[in-house]
């Protein structure tokens, strides 16, 4: 069993005063049995790093370029994130897949770019409501994960996977612990077939995790922690979720 991991995804939220208040509260509430990390907007990385330096809390970004450097206006490379002390980077979040047209192959190349600079990619997979209702959940998440497994090859065991059903993100409608566990078991079996080391890999659940449902989700055998959006912006809620993980 890996150490539980709880990752905040601030999305495009925050301000310097609000971030300072939130991080101060999370620092004050230590220690946590789980590893806790904050994926913040790029512009706040330096300040987040300065605030969390010297603590065991980690930080990361919400996206990364597939390219190492060059004429890619607006992009941020993995090397730049490494310079900011990032440990993690989200890749393939459903909001990037939906609003920015990111497909499986691009997500896989981004994961590889991250690993190449020593960052741990948190690879997000998940089905839409229409895909679930059509009975395609398993096929969709396996296809999304398969692209990354093939790209990373012998390094595939280094990634973190986050199962985030699209219909549960930001909607208040979370997967039941049993629904989430069923998909996590499928993902772990796929990772095991590819790496032989899946028991040591981390698979997070994300999608409307709140203090009142976190413990039941994290109690499932294949759920190793959470990727938390809305609730990560409220210090009391996020602290409670971190505690529920370990
Ligand atoms: C997310 O953005 O990854 C997420 C899980 O959001 P929320 O917790 O708000 O559903």
Image (spheres, rainbow, N blue to C red):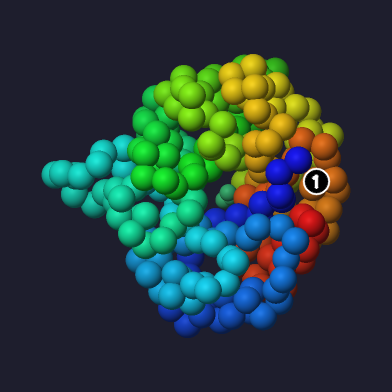
Residue found 59% across the figure and 37% down from its top: 161
157 or 68, which is in the foreground?
157
The residue singled out by tag 1 in the image is 217
The image shows residue 56, relative to residue 68, as above or below, that is below
Residue 136 in the figure: left or right of residue 110: right
Residue 126 in the figure: left or right of residue 155: right
The residue positioned farthest toward the left in the image shown: 71
Which structural element holds mark 1? Answer: helix
Residue found 52% across the figure and 29% down from its top: 156
Give coordinates of residue 12: x percent, y percent: 45, 60
Give coordinates of residue 4: x percent, y percent: 71, 50
183 or 167, which is in the foreground?
183
Viewer can see residue 185? yes
Residue 42 in the figure: left or right of residue 218: left
Q: Specify the quadrant of the image occupied by residue 29.
A: bottom right
The image shows residue 41, relative to residue 192, as above or below, that is below
70 or 55, which is in the foreground?
55
Q: Specify the quadrant of the image occupied by residue 32.
A: bottom right
186 or 30, which is in the foreground?
30
Give coordinates of residue 45: x percent, y percent: 40, 65
Q: Quadrant of the C terminus?
A: bottom right
Residue found 48% across the figure and 24% down from its top: 154
Residue found 39% across the figure and 34% down from its top: 112
Viewer can see residue 187? no
Q: Specify the quadrant of the image occupied by residue 188.
A: top right
Give coordinates of residue 157: x percent, y percent: 56, 31
């Amino acid at each position: 069993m890996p150490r539980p991991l709880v990752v905040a995804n601030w999305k495009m939220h925050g301000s310097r005063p609000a971030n300072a208040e939130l991080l101060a509260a999370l620092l004050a509430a230590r220690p946590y049995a789980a590893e806790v990390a904050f994926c913040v907007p790029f512009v706040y990385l330096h300040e987040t790093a300065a605030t969390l330096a010297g603590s065991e809390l980690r930080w990361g970004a919400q996206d990364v370029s597939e390219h190492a450097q060059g004429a890619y206006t607006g992009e941020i490379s993995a090397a730049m994130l490494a310079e900011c002390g990032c440990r993690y980077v989200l890749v393939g979040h459903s909001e990037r897949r939906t609003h920015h047209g990111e497909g499986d192959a691009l997500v896989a190349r981004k994961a590889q770019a991250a690993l190449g600079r020593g960052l741990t990619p948190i690879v997000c997979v998940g089905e839409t409501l229409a895909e679930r209702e059509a009975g395609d959940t398993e096929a969709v998440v396996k296809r999304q994960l398969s692209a990354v497994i093939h790209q990373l090859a012998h390094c595939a065991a280094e990634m973190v996977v986050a199962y985030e059903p699209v219909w549960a993100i930001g909607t208040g409608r979370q997967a039941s612990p049993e629904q989430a566990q069923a998909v996590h078991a499928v993902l772990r079996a796929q990772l095991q077939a590819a790496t032989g080391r899946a028991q040591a890999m981390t698979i997070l659940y994300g999608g409307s995790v709140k203090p009142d449902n976190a413990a039941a989700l994290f109690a499932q055998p294949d759920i190793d922690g959470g990727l938390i959006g809305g609730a990560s912006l409220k210090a009391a809620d996020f602290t409670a979720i971190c505690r529920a993980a370990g």
